[in-house]
Image: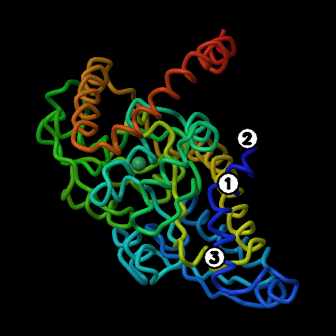
Amino acid sequence: MKRRDLIKGIGGGLAVAGLSACSGADPSGEVKESSKAKTHKWTMVTTWPKNFPGVGIGAERIAKLITQNSGGRITVQVYASGELVPAMEVMTAVSDGSAQMGHGAAYYWKGKAAAAQFFAAVPFGMNAQEMNGWLYYGGGLELWREVYEPFGVLPHPGGNTGTQMGGWFNKEINSLEDLKGLKMRIPGLGGEILKRAGGIPVLLPGGEIFTALQTGTIDATEWIGPYNDLAFGLHQAAKYYYYPGWHEPGTVLECMVNKAAYEELSEDLQGIVDTAISSVNSEMLAEYTARNAEALRSLKTEHNIVPRPYPEDVIKRLKELREEVIAETIAADPMSARVYESFNKFQQDVAAYHEVSERAFYKTRDL
Ligand code: CA
């Protein structure tokens, strides 16, 4: 199935129902003209600080593409975290229709639906390329839509950061002991794993991280990668920068659309919305690939940051704890079990393929 067909297949049936509900008549040329003339004033709320590089700019770009490509028939006004609603209220705002769109990351909503976390990042799970494969062609997106169905929200992959960094720490991490009592900003399943390792996970939106780290409210934080970490100045608040982001191997950002608002759109406008989002989903990964490389160089050469790998025994223990966390999450929630089954099956398949392709190629390139 082609990707466009998949997107259309998911939203398409609803679109037809929405149109005939609006017009109450057969889809004659006249109805089409009147639906084409209709304009929509939309609001997008986000979990990101204003104009934040990468994720925030990506959200702005989706809005701009929709407004521009619809010739102004839909205008989308973007609000940063806290402007209309706090970051952690974004999904609620899209669900209750006070905003028609939202941009964030699905693990922020684990309190509403535990299964949501699997669509953002799974520790030791799939990277960006693999997540896109699963979501678009491996059944992931259909499951994601099913998880959000009760909220009246249509989720889309709305960007990807690529493999993140392990995070910034105010002390060296030499052994598991060093994680005990460590207060770290780390969301989702990664936070649960840290908790089992004796740490204290804290969920803070991006805009509060720097101050929390600088004032010692937290001892460590992960955020995204060099591009965004440098933009926040995290290197000025902690000096130990660890890799890799075992907890976020290829984080999927999400763009949510209020389902009722989407159904009010004519089919061509629905296509414009879908295409704008999927286009930014790809562009953002390209931006992160380019900008992370530049920012890493800058952190090393201009700010004397020496990134260091997590000790292997720490990583091994975190991976064991990951199995416990996943087992408990899926035992407690049947939907999480279904989502993880699909996720895991895809990961096994793609890992076998990437063993002889991506991984084998990296090794070859380094010879
Ligand atoms: Ca992160």
Mark number, residue 9 = 1
Residue 367 percent coordinates (x, y): 66, 8
Q: Quadrant of the N terminus?
A: top right
Give yes or no for contact between labels 2 and 3 (Cβ–Cβ under 8 Å): no
Classify 10 Å Cα crowding around label 3: few (below 14), some (14-19), many (20 and above).
many
Classify 10 Å Cα crowding around label 1: few (below 14), some (14-19), many (20 and above).
few
Name the residue rendered at 57%, 53% in the picture.
Answer: 157
Name the residue rendered at 46%, 49% in the picture.
Answer: 224
Residue 252 percent coordinates (x, y): 51, 48
Dot 2 or dot 3: first in sequence order is 2
Q: CA distance from mark 1 to mark 2?
A: 10 Å
Classify 10 Å Cα crowding around label 2: few (below 14), some (14-19), many (20 and above).
few
Give yes or no for contact between labels 1 and 3 (Cβ–Cβ under 8 Å): no
User: Label 2 sits on what residue type?
Assistant: Met
Residue sticking out furthest to the top: 367
Is the residue 269 above or below the residue 159 in the image? below
Q: Which residue is mark 2?
A: 1
Write down the quadrant of residue 23 in the picture: bottom right
Secondary structure, mark 3, is helix
Secondary structure, mark 1, is helix
Name the residue rendered at 64%, 18% in the picture.
Answer: 362
User: Label 1 sits on what residue type?
Assistant: Gly
Q: Which residue is mark 3?
A: 18
User: Label 3 sits on what residue type?
Assistant: Gly
Dot 1 or dot 3: first in sequence order is 1
Q: CA distance from mark 1 to mark 3?
A: 15 Å
Dot in front, 2 or 3 = 3
Q: CA distance from mark 2 to mark 3?
A: 24 Å
Secondary structure, mark 2, is loop
